Image: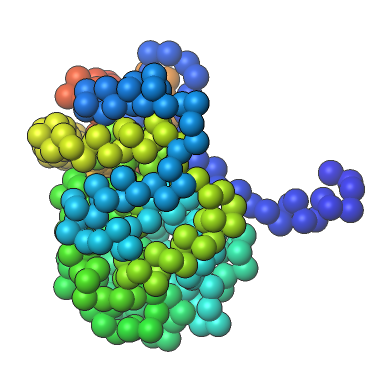
C-alpha cells in the first residue's frame, strides 16, 4: 500500500473471528456455537415476523425485547440495552464507558477482542496475569484503574469466578465501571445480573449466541444502572437508531418464552462437556475445569498445533491459539454427543502417532 493513508490503515489491527469454513461435512468445534438449533418457538416467531412485518421499520426502542429481558432478570427496561450480538454491545461499552486517564484492566488471557477495541479507541490498558492455576484472582485488580473488564466464565479457559470475587472488584473500585462479559455464563457460572441493583458501577453483558443457539441472529444485551445504559444508548444512536432488525427482535424475545427448551439444551451441553472432559482425561489430557460450552485442554506429550492439524486432516476443526502461555492448549467447543464421540475416536487414532 503506497498511498499517504497506508499508515492509518496499517495501524488498524482488526479482530479476526474464528474460522467459518465453507467446506461441507466438517465437525466444527472451533467457535463455541450451540450444537442444537434454536427453539421451534423462535423459528415460528421469526417466520411470523418475516411474513407479516418486514415492510415496516423495526421499533427504534426495541421496547418489547427490553421488557422481556427486564422481566426475565427482575429489572426495569431502563436497566436493559440491546445490540447486534454482544460484540457490538462490548464495542459500544468500550467507546462510551471504558476510556479514562487510568488504565483499563483485564486478564492477560481473555477475550482477544479487548486489546483490539483498546487500540481502536486509544484506550490505555494493562493486562493482569491469571494465577498459576489459570484463575482470575480478584485481589490482583485492586490497584488504580479507570475501569475493569473480564469474561465470566473466562475465555478461552472456561474457568468461572464466584460472585464474591466479582463483588470484591466492584467494592474495590466504586467509581470505576466493571464490565462482566457473560457470554458463556448459562453453562454453569454465577451471573452477576443479580448484583445490578446493588452496584451502580456494574455492567453485565450477555449474548443469545451460545446458550440460546442464536449466533446467526446477532443479539446481545447489557444490564446495568440506567446511567450506564443511557451512555450506551447515546453512542449507539449516533451510528444507527435501530437496535435490531424485526426478525432478531421477534426471535430473541421468543427464546426467553421457551424456558423448557433452554434448560433442556443447556443441560445436554453441560452433560456432554462432563463426559468429554472424562474421556479427554482418559486419553492423558489435562482439562481445565470448564463452566462454559467448551473445554480447554493440553496434553503433556503432544504438541497442540500438531494435534489441531491432525484433527483438521480428519475434518474436525478445533481452536488453537499461539499466545505463549496457552499455545499448548486446544479449545474444543462442545458438540452433539455424536460429534464429541467422533472427536475422541479421532484423537485415539492420532495420539500414538503424534510427535
Ligand atoms: N464475549 C466473549 C468472551 C466471547 O467469546 C464472544 C464470542 N466470540 C463474545 C463475547 C461475542 O459473542 P456475540 O457477538 O456472538 O454475542
Seen at 33% across and 84% down, the residue is 174
In the picture shown, does residue 346 fall above or below 260?
A: above
Number of marks in the image? 0
Residue furthest to the top: 25
Seen at 89% across and 46% down, the residue is 2
User: Image quadrant of residue 73?
Assistant: bottom left
Q: Position of residue 292 (x, y in %)?
A: 23, 46
User: Image quadrant of residue 282?
Assistant: top left
Which of the image's four quarters has the C terminus? top left
Left or right: 321, with 282 as reference point: right
Left or right: 15, with 255 as reference point: right
Which of the image's four quarters has the N terminus? top right
Q: Position of residue 299 (x, y in %)?
A: 28, 42
Is residue 281 in view from this perspective?
yes
In the picture shown, does residue 260 fall above or below 118?
A: above
Q: Position of residue 348 (x, y in %)?
A: 23, 24
Query: Between residues 10 and 247, which one lies in front from this camera angle?
Result: 247
In the picture shown, does residue 283 fall above or below 78?
A: above
What's the colour scheme? Answer: rainbow
Query: Between residues 322 and 182, which one lies in front from this camera angle?
Result: 182
Is residue 129 in view from this perspective?
no
Left or right: 85, with 167 as reference point: right
Seen at 43% across and 75% down, the residue is 147
Left or right: 176, with 291 as reference point: right
Q: Position of residue 214 (x, y in %)?
A: 33, 34
Seen at 80% across and 56% down, the residue is 7
Amino acid at each position: 500500500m503506497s498511498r499517504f493513508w497506508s499508515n492509518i490503515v496499517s495501524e488498524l489491527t482488526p479482530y479476526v473471528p474464528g474460522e467459518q469454513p465453507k467446506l461441507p461435512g466438517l465437525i466444527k468445534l472451533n467457535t463455541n456455537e450451540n450444537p442444537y438449533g434454536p427453539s421451534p418457538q423462535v423459528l415460528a416467531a421469526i417466520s411470523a415476523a418475516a411474513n407479516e412485518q418486514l415492510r415496516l421499520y423495526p421499533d427504534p426502542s426495541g421496547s418489547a425485547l427490553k421488557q422481556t429481558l427486564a422481566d426475565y432478570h427482575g429489572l426495569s427496561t431502563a436497566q436493559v440495552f440491546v445490540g447486534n450480538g454482544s460484540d457490538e454491545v462490548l464495542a459500544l461499552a468500550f467507546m462510551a464507558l471504558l476510556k479514562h486517564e487510568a488504565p483499563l484492566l483485564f486478564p492477560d488471557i481473555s477475550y482477544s477482542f479487548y486489546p483490539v477495541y483498546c487500540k481502536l479507541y486509544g484506550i490505555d490498558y494493562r493486562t493482569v496475569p491469571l494465577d498459576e492455576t489459570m484463575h482470575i484472582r480478584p485481589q490482583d485488580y485492586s490497584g488504580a484503574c479507570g475501569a475493569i473488564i473480564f469474561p465470566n466464565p473466562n475465555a478461552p479457559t472456561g474457568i468461572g469466578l464466584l460472585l464474591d470475587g466479582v463483588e470484591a472488584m466492584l467494592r474495590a473500585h466504586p467509581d470505576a465501571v466493571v464490565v462482566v462479559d457473560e457470554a458463556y455464563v448459562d453453562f454453569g457460572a454465577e451471573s452477576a445480573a443479580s448484583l445490578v441493583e446493588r452496584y451502580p458501577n456494574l455492567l453485565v453483558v450477555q449474548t443469545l449466541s451460545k446458550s440460546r443457539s442464536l449466533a446467526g441472529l446477532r443479539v446481545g444485551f447489557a444490564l446495568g444502572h440506567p446511567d450506564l445504559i443511557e451512555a450506551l444508548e447515546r453512542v449507539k444512536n449516533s451510528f444507527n437508531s435501530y437496535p435490531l432488525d424485526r426478525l432478531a427482535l421477534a426471535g430473541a424475545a421468543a427464546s426467553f418464552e421457551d424456558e423448557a427448551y433452554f434448560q433442556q439444551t443447556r443441560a445436554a451441553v453441560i452433560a456432554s462437556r462432563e463426559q468429554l472432559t472424562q474421556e479427554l482425561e482418559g486419553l492423558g489430557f489435562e482439562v481445565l475445569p470448564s463452566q462454559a460450552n467448551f473445554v480447554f485442554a493440553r496434553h503433556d506429550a503432544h504438541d497442540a498445533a500438531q494435534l489441531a492439524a491432525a484433527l483438521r486432516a480428519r475434518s474436525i476443526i478445533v481452536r488453537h491459539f499461539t499466545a505463549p502461555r496457552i499455545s499448548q492448549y486446544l479449545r474444543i467447543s462442545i458438540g452433539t454427543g455424536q460429534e464429541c464421540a467422533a472427536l475422541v475416536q479421532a484423537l485415539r487414532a492420532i495420539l500414538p502417532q503424534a510427535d
